[in-house]
Amino acid sequence: MLSIARWMLTTTLTLCGLTAHAQTGDPVAGATKYQTVYVNEAWPLQPKSGSCVACHGSAQAPSISFNGRETPAGIAFAIANNRGGKGFLDGILGAQDIADISAYITNPNISVAPVIRINPSALVLSGTVVTPAEGTLNLANTGARALFINAISVSGTGFALNAAGTTCRLNEPIAVNAQCQLAVRFTSSQAVSNAQGFLVINHNAPGNVSTITLSASIGSGAGITVAGGPLRFPDTPIGTSSSEQLLILRSTGSVALRINSIVLSPADYLSGPSTTCAPGTDIPAGGSCTLGVLLRPAMQGPRPGSVSITHNASSTPTTVDLSGVGTTSSNPVARWSANTLDFPATPVGSTGASQSLAISNSGSAPLVISGFSISGVSFQLADETCTRAALVPGGTCSVSVRFAPAATGTSSGTLTISSNSSPPAAPVALSGVGVPEGTAILSAAPAELSFASTPVGQSAQALSLTVTNTGAAAATLSAPRISGAHAGDFSVTPDAACSAGSILPPTGRCLLSVTFTPRAAGARTASLSIGGASTAAISLVGTATPAAASLTVDVGSVVDLGTVIAGSRVTRSIRLSAGAADLLVGSIVINGPFSIEPTGSCGRSGFSISAGQSCTVDLSFSALSEGANTGSLVITSTAPGSPTAVQLSATVQRSNAAREGGGCSLAGRHAPFDPLLPVLLLLSVVVVWTRARQRSNG
């Protein structure tokens, strides 16, 4: 009896030893065992009791993301605690089976997995509002086992999967060296430039997730052709106009062609009298308009130029080259340096500062100026240097005009030259404003603030202007006020002397600082006024570019969970924030022995974070494998530099109790009791009974 008891004890300790020491795995044997378990075929001498296929598809290669838990200990832990639904294998797989399977899925030389290849790696689409933008992706399986697609999602406004051209099917095998296609379509009811989206494919190949960037541009459906160009003008004397040449613009699309702007450059080229094309007008599909062009050279020599036409067709802008040569005239030609003179507000009874104009002779003969005449009682000739001698070709002289208003309100007049110029010089228009005597007059310099191109939501460098009281009385200032179409894009900060209620004495000055923070893309304009007895108005001009999407991760690029006790679990929340523009997130993928919990507010694929808003990704880590554990969180989005990677790390350390050792068990960790205990109890009883009997016999 004692020998039997000793045999049972030895056997029990041997079994205990087998469970307490790791087995050496055979990856080849593990391949067969893995496939058998995965597809839920009957394990030898065991009934079927569960399946991996329901969650992972009918794969025939390691498709489960073990996230670093592929060690024997990690697999045993998952089975014992029913992690990922693997509890059905408890009692079916022994230590050697687990070791073999672990060796198989961790051995890089066992190449039995499918491999997905997607071409192209990014899809660029183009179309019109009439014809959708369409494109195709080719998916090929270049691995050693069947490829299965579990899910396909498309995100981004206007993007969709095109069933007509898609041959890939969910949960159907793509054989080795076989391929299928995914067709994508983008539609929009209006013109769109560089719309962005993502195509996310979940599959059983390594990595489990593939994210494809989508971009699309949609034209309006309008079309344009320009007949008649390029235009070559005959040699034309300086200061004279050539004969008119014509360009015919035709609307060739399926919708109306809108002309947004027509720009002739340089100033030698002018719009002719036959012009019917005008900015802001629509040309019906099939219709046309005429653009007449004249050459009026300002100087001698070749005069290269162009006409640029912006419109709603995809080919905007359309440019036509212009050329001609300016020649010297055999006649004298008088040219003014400006066509108008505008005088600031001036008190009635006083004379303002004079303003000057230059006159040049662009002809080839001497220019004789006999005099000047001024219309308008408020304007006076102040000085001139032009009647003293003939003006040789290329020579210049000047004339000055004063403004002395005879009455309040606006005054106008003209300045005319009398000379032998051929053709005669056109009169110069004069204007000014008269105000009552003793009035405060505010002027501002510069008269326009033009800001540099600025992204939406960002602020341009502030610009300053000086307000001066040029009147004879003190000015009580009101608060600076911005008005106009885009007043909300500009803000003004006065210094103490320019603030509301301040008194600006005659000749006094103060400063205003203006900031441009555009709210939308495009040209932005407004007007700034600062009031007193008279008001100075300043034009505000800026151009806004679309805001670029941006992504901020609150933890930066690294998350270290520190030291974690084996068998425990830790979590960490990461916040993702969008910048000044809406951010589209294609996918969030985690690698290594880490998991994403469902408690976070961020999605996993195909979602947006509104401008200025954020969401959270909740990470978890179960400490299974001792030592250093690393992984990454990869975020694919429309932010520059995408994808964004966050490196994850944690160090697993055994607890003190584990390091001290002790005990073994034949039971799974979720078993109601340890079957080894009754065996040990029985052995103890047998040993005690045997010894007692030996004593009684002795």
Image: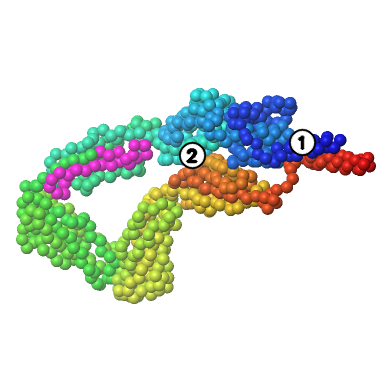
Q: CA distance from mark 2 to mark 1?
A: 64 Å
Tell which of 382 and 547 is nearer to you: 547
290 is within the stretch colored magenta: no
Q: Position of residue 301 (x, y in %)?
A: 13, 45
Above or below residue 68? Residue 170 is above
Question: In this figure, which residue is indicated by the disc labeled 1?
Answer: 11
Question: In this figure, which residue is indicated by the disc labeled 2?
Answer: 197
Picture quadrant where residue 410 is located: bottom left
- Direction front: furthest residue: 698
| Left or right relative to 45: residue 287 | left
Q: Position of residue 98 (x, y in %)?
A: 66, 35
Q: Secondary structure at mark 1?
A: helix
Q: How is the image coloured?
A: rainbow
Picture quadrant where residue 436 is located: bottom left
Q: Which residues are magenta?
A: 292-320
What amino acid type is highlighted by mark number 1? Answer: Thr
What amino acid type is highlighted by mark number 2? Answer: Gly
Above or below residue 600? Residue 232 is above
| Residue at point 41%, 66% (across, down) | 493
Q: Secondary structure at mark 2?
A: strand
Tell which of 393 and 211 is nearer to you: 211
Q: Closer to the observer: label 2 or label 1? A: 1
| Left or right relative to 103: residue 643 | left
Q: Position of residue 474 (x, y in %)?
A: 35, 75
Tell which of 216 and 43 is nearer to you: 43
Question: Is residue 284 among the parts visible in the rendering?
Answer: no
Crowding at dot 2, Cα within 10 Å, few <14 / some 14-19 / many 20+, comes out as many
Above or below residue 695? Residue 441 is below
| Residue at point 54%, 37% (across, down) | 207
